[in-house]
Amino acid sequence: MEKYFNVNSNGCSIGCKLYCDEPSRVTSLVLFGHGFSGNRDNKAAEKLAKRLISKNRGAALLIFDWPCHGSDVRKTLRLEDCEKYLDEMIAYAKTAYPNAELFGSATSFGGYLYLKHISEKGCPFKKVALRCPAVPMYEVITETIASGEDLKKLEKGKPVLVGFDSKIRIDKTFTESLREADITGRDMLDHAEDILIIHGTRDEVVPFEAVRDFAENNLIEFEAVEGADHKFRDPAKMDRVLKSIAAFFGMK
């Protein structure tokens, strides 16, 4: 079963999508954060949901739109809005499914936001699995996603539209907030046992070496997938990711 709905709380209206066979009997819930310029119709989330639900009675996956993404109506991306949405979704998951174990999964920009949250507020998940998390998110935006012309406009105080699947409106306020919220050197040792990072060696968006070093410095389990690009377009490599996440969650 797939269900679209909005979580309305504290001035937020967050577009959500739930994958679940029996909503009244959820025992394991995965809260999924998509990547930059993605949305709640994320294909990787759908594949993960179907795999977990097919093998685990009571499993469910809940994905939501970040601010300015998908169905969201905010105009310009703000890091603080992303943090607020994540706080609201964690609170919603715990309230709506009080008897379920809460797991986390995220990709790219979503992975950066999850790691930022964990480093600042602790880990709300029993386990969290991240695919190609954009640990150096400031560099990803300024060196890969935004063009040279975009950067010139940002420096002049003008907003720009950037992204992959869709275009997201950002400005210098957003990029500066990313620069200030650098997580590359943060200490995650207290949460290392609860985190899995999976990254492709041929990622063309998020530097493989930077994420590998972050994981090694924090003793986080790190799985390198040889030859995989950022989106894991090779079905066999994506299937490996799904298997690894399910195993890490104890939901094989």
Image (tube, rainbow, N blue to C red):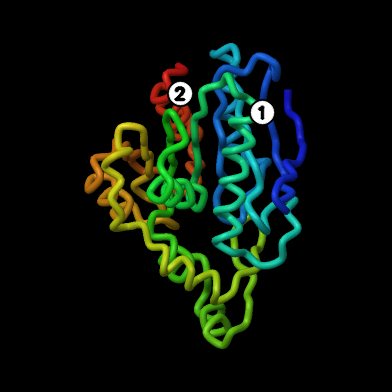
Q: Nearer the viewer, residue 221 or 240?
A: 221
Q: Nearer the viewer, residue 179 or 2?
A: 179
Q: Is residue 99 left or right of residue 69?
A: left
* Residue 195 sits above or below residue 51 on the image: below
Q: Is residue 55 left or right of residue 125?
A: right
Marks 2 and 1: which is nearer the front?
1
Determine whether the residue tagged by mark 2 lies in a helix, strand or loop.
Answer: helix
Q: Residue at x 57, y 26 (%)?
A: 29
Where does the C terminus fall, quadrant-wise?
Answer: top left
Q: Which residue is mark 1?
A: 96
Q: Is residue 192 left or right of residue 120?
A: left
Q: Residue at x 36, y 32 (%)?
A: 194
* Residue 158 sits above or below residue 175 on the image: below
Q: Position of residue 149 (x, y in %)?
A: 55, 81
Marks 2 and 1 sit apart, C-alpha to C-alpha, by 23 Å
Mark carried by residue 246: 2
Q: Amino acid at mark 2?
A: Ala
Task: Tell me the quarter of the picture where residue 48 sits.
Answer: top right
Q: Position of residue 13 (x, y in %)?
A: 74, 49
Q: Position of residue 188 (x, y in %)?
A: 30, 45
Determine whether the residue tagged by mark 1 lies in a helix, strand or loop.
Answer: helix
Q: Earlier in the sequence, mark 2 or mark 1?
A: 1
Label total for image? 2
Q: Position of residue 81 (x, y in %)?
A: 61, 58
* Residue 101 sits above or below residue 86 on the image: above
